[in-house]
Amino acid sequence: MMEQQLTKILGAVPFPFSISDQEKTVHVYYNSSMAVMDTRQEGVDFPLDSHEHASYEFFMPISSLAVIKLEEDIFPAEFCKVIPINAEQTHGSAGYYKNCRCFGWHIDADLIKSLAGSMYGKPQVTFSNDFIRVGKEVNLLLRWFMEECKNKQAGSCFILDALVTQLTITLLRQVKNSCSYMAEKKVLSAKPNIERTIEYLHDSYRSHYSLQDVARIANMSPYHFIRLFKNQTGKTPYAYLLDIKIERAKELLRSKKYTVTEVCFLCGFNNVSHFATLFKRKVGVSPSEYSRL
């Protein structure tokens, strides 16, 4: 029964060992999108064999399993590190190893492709076959998933779905893959255009602000421009412009050559009340108080 329920995630191909025969040593936690397999306590035997499945696997050898084979490549095991295995990628043990302790999880390929498509506009994902140390967030999400599977409280199916979604997004962000590489490449190629718009904002802070005009300088659509600008600076273009205006206002107020009203209009604001409110929110004191410091 257990193997039938896991077929959706793991496929109909056989495991390197039988779950049914090893129920006492293989602890399995699963929902419709992910299965976690834990043999950290007692270990299982891995025969010299290869298999493949439709899901993506993230596998962590802990002891005894010395060499892993992925297609035609041989990988010496790095214990307590995770190696991603792509959907339909042939893999297995490169030898016969007894009492192997390991930990791993399989995620439904359709879920990964759907989330990658939403995040990067490209559903086809290939993870790099490198041993890596996963972050604390991944470990925490896996522990929550296993606890929720064991407790089986009301509404657990919704929590499990949410945990798998969060875990998958975290892996797509943190583990080197074809989609994240392309996204990083796009950001790097856009950097000169973003820097050009930053120069424009510094030079034209007194002028009327138009998102369409600034995006045109970057040669991007407004939506794409905002996303890449914020990725590079941590702020939206308009928020960045307001910071430029406020910094210039502080300089003029410190010079004590201008009234608050004059500073307001010199910095491109057209309403003194709005300027004073924004200044106090960002600086902590009103323009009048700042000019007296």
Image: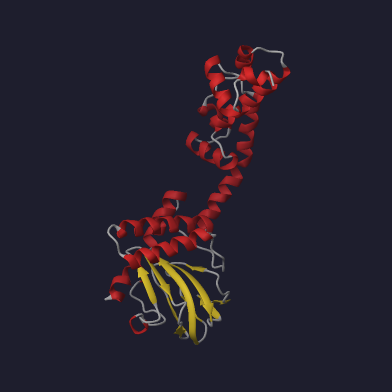
Q: Please tell me which residue is depicted at 41% across the width and 62% down the height of the picture.
A: 144
Q: Please tell me which residue is depicted at 50% across the width and 58% down the height of the picture.
A: 137
171 is higher (above) or lower (below) than 99: above
Q: Is residue 132 left or right of residue 150?
A: right
Q: Nearer the viewer, residue 5 or 120?
A: 5
263 is higher (above) or lower (below) than 26: above
Colouring scheme, one of rainbow, by chain, secondary structure, one colour:
secondary structure
Q: Position of residue 291 (x, y in %)?
A: 67, 18
Q: Is residue 153 visible?
A: yes
Quarter of the image where one finds residue 146 = bottom left
> For the C terminus, which image quadrant?
top right
> For the N terminus, which image quadrant?
bottom left
Quarter of the image where one finds residue 207 = top right
Number of numbered discs on residues: 0
170 is higher (above) or lower (below) than 207: below
Q: Position of residue 59 (x, y in %)?
A: 48, 71
Q: Is residue 123 visible?
A: no
Q: Position of residue 88 (x, y in %)?
A: 42, 70
Q: Please tell me which residue is depicted at 57% across the width and 18% down the height of the picture.
A: 269
Q: Position of residue 268 (x, y in %)?
A: 59, 18
Q: Is residue 182 left or right of residue 145?
A: right
Quarter of the image where one finds residue 106 = bottom left
Q: Please tell me which residue is depicted at 54% across the width and 52% down the height of the picture.
A: 182
